[in-house]
Amino acid sequence: MEDKESHRYNPKTDMYTGSGIVNPAHSTESVQLKSITPRLSNSDLHEPNPTEKPQKISKPTSPQNGGSDVFGLCCSSSGHVPVARKQQKEDSGVYDVGDGGGDDDDDDDDDVRKKGHTAMENQLGIEYAVTDVPPIHMCILFGLQQVLLSISSTISIPLIVSGKICADDLTLVKSEIMSTFLFMCGVCTLLQVLVGVRLPIIQGGCHKFIPAIAALMALDMWKCPADMVARVAAYNNGSTENVTEIWQSRMREIQGGIMLASLAQVLIGCTGLLGILLEYLGPITIVPTISLVGLSLIDVALMFCEKHWGITALTVGLVFLFSLYLRNVKIPFPTFSKKTGCRVIKYPLFKLLPVIFAVVLAWVFCAILTATDTLKQPGVRTDSKTNVLELANWFFFPYPGQWGMPTISVASFMAMLAATITSIIESVGDYYACARISGVPPPPAHAVNRGIAIEGLGSLISGAVGSGGATTSYSQNVGAIGFTKVASRWAFFAAGIIFLISGLCGKFGAFLTMLPDPVLGGIVLVSFGMVTAVGLSTLSFVDLSSGRNLTIIGSSLLVGLMIPRYLADHPNAIDTGNVELDQVLQVLMGTAMFVGGVFAFFLDNTVPGTPEERGIIKWRELADVGTTGDVIKGDEQKEKQKAADYLNNIYGFPLLTNCLNRVACCRFVPFMPSFAFKRVSPFKWLCKKFKNTN
């Protein structure tokens, strides 16, 4: 039942509080209705006699379910107020999930959840927002959907590292390294979702470390013995020759470099060095940084797609079918409860689980072609990766120091440090892209600092355990939010649990890696495209009629694509005379988002331009207020408090934010939610000056 106080008539404002009813005698243009999406034209509004009393408003319907976006306005061309669908459907016993008005608790919870969404979340069609908690069974499906997107890319890292450390022919060793890596991906994902930036982020294996590991293992002291194959063969045949120390010594060298580089990442996050740079970060810098995350991964998508373009096209077509064409189609399900008895509900499965449906159908299609011996290519046939299933252990529990005490050297540290810096840049871009695609405000400085620190901590633990690599945020999982419409952090928490189970039960993780490459390529293609589009959508903040902005953005995108491509074709182009410095520059300049982002950052902060022209005003308002216009201006103090509570609910520590806010010294800790250290910022000064002049 509706609260009567929520529709009390206020004669001063000539409107009903909480309902959005506006007296038709007044111009609707004078009232801020930023939370109404999409905007209604005057022809869509019913205009009764101004002397009539406003009608009592019934419970609103969700815009995603075909109802009006305006609660309380006399809308629709027929001129009637929307009525709760329970009254329309109770005779048939069929209910749409989220329509509201039903007696079932799940319907009421779903209706309350959608009413609590912000305007941006409703505009993007988000079904489960960042702070929403889906049912447990749906969390598992959503988590599995995210794992399917990332596990094949993740599992390739331990297999590559095994070859670099001379363990390519040691089946049991490869199985243990793979289980360790999957286990650590789960640990790092849980840490990031619960304590880190607290956005829906998957922490998977970082491929940026592969060139560094390859360069390190190419040194004369770490090259595999010439007779390694013969030694392994003799060892497998029962020889007493010990080959364990050969690969473990190389693994310990990799561990030491990763741990030192990760410790530097923790210090960068905890000291707030990155947060200071964010003061000078605007939308013109964000556009090429995020867009180049997707554009630079074309080769990764191509590596999977080129195995079989027909199956790739089938997978992409299925994703489009379920996520775009059938997104409003709801599947009826019979349910039973003691309160309502037997009845049928409708659920938008195609909209929420497009990846799982697409993967299952394409996987079955590949299995049929494999059974008929139509497919010949490795990686396309469903039985081409059965060796991974065979070498995996049933149960394995990794622990720190399982391969011995890590060793430290300058060469390993410098090689891993370059990859770590690149990973930090990529993760910051993913944080902003994730916030944008999830319909929440950009992450504040303390959340970014904490996210980078937790990512470094996770990689530090990964190095201590001996997974053979570090972790970073996965862009394809961020992009998947755009077409699954599931941004709940608890779905990604479930994904972390699945990663943990995959590591502890090696057979389960190995089964997921049997996904055919072109099927994964189709999913990755759509996800990377979504990441690129999210970056370009940030252009809405800037003045696109400005030649200054167009020049900076266009040049940054092209430079970000050209320099890495040139270095890939000319690997010896950088020659400073110092091998370690050459490796660092090679990795940094070979990263598209670093080159394009730094180029745009420099030009945007040095080329003259007004704050409004650069989009700084709108960008800072969105970051500072955080409610995207959902609060109609009234009591300014209450608005600020509501905005602060909203941001704390997303980026603050669970259950501890209120306690930490009472501790004065937390204001000076860069990763605390109450971080408010006063710095002289030109952007804040310009914003205040611009507001005072108006």
Image (cartoon, rainbow, N blue to C red):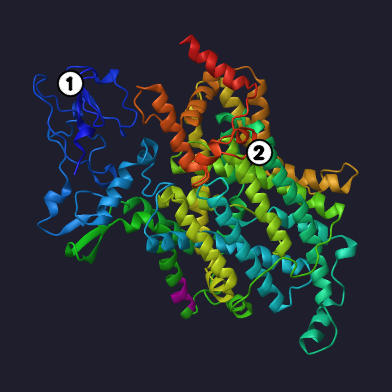
Q: Helix, strand or loop at disc 1?
A: loop
**Quadrant that contains the C terminus:** top left
Q: Is residue 368 magenta?
A: yes
Taking depth in this image into account, of 630 and 375 the one nearest to the observer is: 630
Question: Image point 89% across, 45% down: which residue?
Answer: 578
Q: Is residue 525 rendered magenta in the image?
A: no
Q: Which residues are magenta?
A: 366-370
**Residue at left offset 47%, top offset 30%:** 622
From the viewer's perspective, is the residue at label 1 or at label 2 nearer?
1
Compare residues 456 and 429 and report the one nearer the observer.
456
Tell me the quarter of the picture where residue 302 sits. Answer: bottom right
Spot occupied by residue 470 in the image (x, y as percentages of width and height): 68, 56
Mark 1 and mark 2: Cα distance apart in space: 53 Å
Mark 1 residue type: Pro
Q: Is residue 664 visible?
A: yes
**Rendered view: 513 above or below 212:** below
Left or right position of 54 against 323: left
x and y percentages locating residue 112 in the rendered image: 29, 46
Q: Which residue is mark 2?
A: 560
- Residue type at numbered disc 2: Gly
Establish if 526 lies above or below 71. Answer: below
Provide the residue designation for mark 1: 24
Q: Position of residue 81 (x, y in %)?
A: 15, 36
Q: Quadrant of the N terminus?
A: top left
Query: Can residue 330 be seen here?
Result: no
Residue most extreme to the bottom: 238
State left or right for residue 6 relative to residue 463. Answer: left
Query: Against 51, is 91 above or below?
Result: below
Mark 2 burial class by Cα count in 10 Å: few <14, some 14-19, many 20+: many
- Residue 669 quadrant: top right
Magenta segment, prevailing SS (helix, strand or loop) = helix
